[in-house]
Image (cartoon, grey):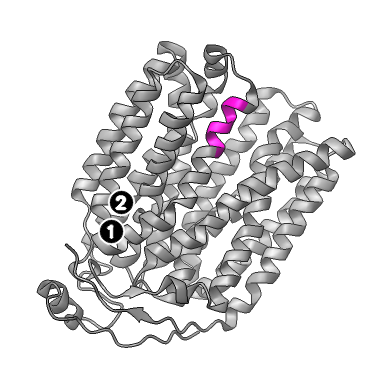
Amino acid sequence: MTVDFETARPTPGHDQSAAKSLSAAPHGEYVGQDSAKAWLMASIAFVLMFTTFGTLYSFGAFLKPMMEDFGGSHGAVSGLFSTIMCLGLLLGSFTGRLSDRLGARPVLVAASLALGASMILTAFVNRLWLTYLTFGVGMGFAVACSYVPSLVLVGVWFKRRREAALGFAVAGIGCGTLVLAPLAAALNERFGWRETFVIVGLVGGAVMLGCAAVSHSPPAAIGRPRMSIARAIREPAFGLLYVGGLLFQIAQFISFTYLAAFARLHGVDPVAAATLVGLIGASSVVGRFGLAALSGRFGAVRVYQTTVLIFALSFGIWLMARSYALMATFAIVMGASYGGFVAMSPAVAAQIFGIEGLGGLLGALYTSGAVGVVIGPPVAGFLIDHTGSYELTITFAMGMGLAAFATLLPLSHARASVQFEPERKVL
């Protein structure tokens, strides 16, 4: 796989330290890549994702008490989560481009302030519709300012070990879910949901603010030549990544939404049914570390395609599952492949398109997740309601996974020829 780029040269008035660093390393490389400082940045990204997504995925612990407090239905309150996910993914293109222009630090500061403010303000709201502004919009903005900029921060600091570093960083999502979800539930039992929101907002916001203060991009990464996103989205490789990601996430959100309900239908008690979703999170950590590490031996694109194929075939286990053991097996296999997909997606994008302007590119690609969460669960719910069973829904999810694999197969021969826009001075 080859990538053609035009040579980028600093324009007059451009920051001289950036120009010096650009001249000190080959194009697309920065001084300090793959160094101890680079791994510090990866660790910061891990903590940021641990905090952001651990807080977000703890929402289930607050669903019932918020319903009782506001007198809202399951749909009305759970809609907060969908709002956060859609906004977080849709705004990622904007926050990614900000990271490309200004560096990750100012955007990560905004993420920390948004997370803290959204949690604390929501604790004092007495109307459900207001929570869509304080929690839905506020937390959605925090996710957007944290996720893609954290990936960009890691991407620009690594070259040889980029896949492993990204796998380590996104493992923070699974680890945060494992730790913060039960912790939030325990705090909720002792103090109530409003007090817990204040505690999480203060502590989580402070932790993220500290990470943002320590984070910084290589000098040449700030104000560097930017990928033309308009040009990139016309590249065949972009279309393959976008459509493949969309099909994958339609199936992914179906499993997250309906696996526990499927288990309950087959006589599994509520706690054990909910544990299946926890197994997805736990096994995804293994996938993020393990499958990403294999890319050094087999290549990022090939590992990426393999994870999608394993993901699609795992739905065959769910289709046959009538025992809890098989349901758990599906959760583990699907979770590991899903984790590998999350870790490999930015690595493959960086390999094909390069790291200049990576934030804007990833943000544009990740809007597919917002579309997936809108399509997957409603279509699955329609099929379940009209057939009275889950078989057609699971088959549909498997079909989406196999279609994603077929869509991504041509990536093995992808060749991008992305042009750079002229550098612009960062004010």
Q: Secondary structure at mark 2?
A: helix
Magenta-tinted stretch: 76-82
Q: Residue at x 58, y 83 (%)?
A: 413
Q: Secondary structure at mark 1?
A: helix
Q: Is residue 19 left or right of residue 111?
A: left
Mark 1 Cα-neighbour bin, 10 Å: few <14, some 14–19, many ≥20: some
Percent x, y of residue 38: 26, 62
Q: Is residue 168 above or below residue 296?
A: above
Q: Residue at x 24, y 52 (%)?
A: 105
Mark 2 Cα-neighbour bin, 10 Å: few <14, some 14–19, many ≥20: some
Percent x, y of residue 232: 47, 74
Under mark 1, the amino acid is Trp
Q: Residue at x 29, y 75 (%)?
A: 225
Q: Is residue 86 left or right of residue 362?
A: right
Question: Picture quarter containing residue 224?
Answer: bottom left
Q: Is residue 408 left or right of residue 12?
A: right
| CB atoms of marks 1 and 2 within 8 Å | yes
Residue 190 appears in view: yes
Q: Which residue is mark 2?
A: 43
Q: Which residue is mark 1?
A: 39
